[in-house]
Image (cartoon, rainbow, N blue to C red):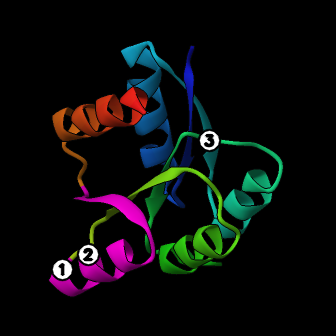
Amino acid sequence: MRKKVLIVDDEPQYLEALSTYIVKLGDFDCTTKSSGRGALQTLSKQKFECILLDLVMPDIGGIQVLKEIQTQKIDTRVVVISGFLNAQISEQCKKYGAYDVIDKPVDMHKLKCILKRVKAF
């Protein structure tokens, strides 16, 4: 059975590149949203096994989305993707339930390994 992945990023090129790559892996269907607010609205209607979540977005940032996912007890694995990572931000993401944290530009091999772990659940 194919797993559902939600990709949330305000940069259209990342949405397209990530969704194209993930669909080509063959085991995943992708939905994309360009805002934190859009992601939360989608999560209220659909279940996803994994969310790839950008941290910095103009409306609701990734940390706030993580907090909402945790508060609403949404059963999913969130992989935070950001070009602004440091140890403190990574720790904060994990505190709010991030499954993993990776830097932009995304190392596609690392992403593939993470998605394989998600698929195993």
Q: Which residue is mark 2?
A: 90
Provide the residue span drawn in magenta: 86-104
Q: Residue at left 31%, top 28%?
A: 116
Q: Secondary structure at mark 2?
A: helix
Q: Quadrant of residue 22?
A: top left
Circle number at residue 11: none
Residue mark closest to the camera, 2 vs 1: 2
Of pointers 3 and 2, the one earlier in the residue sequence: 3
Looking at the rendered structure, the kind of residue marked 2 is: Ser
Determine whether the residue tagged by mark 3 lies in a helix, strand or loop.
loop
Q: Residue beneath label 3, please?
A: 48
Q: For the residues labelled 3 and 2, say whether their Cβ atoms are less than 8 Å apart.
A: no
Which sits in the foreground, 47 or 34? 47
Q: Quadrant of the N terminus?
A: top right
Counting from the top left corner in percent of width and height, residue 59 is at: 65, 78
Residue under numbered circle 1: 86
| 88 left or right, relative to 14 | left
Mark 1 or mark 3, earlier in chain? 3
CB of mark 2 within 8 Å of CB of mark 1?
Answer: yes
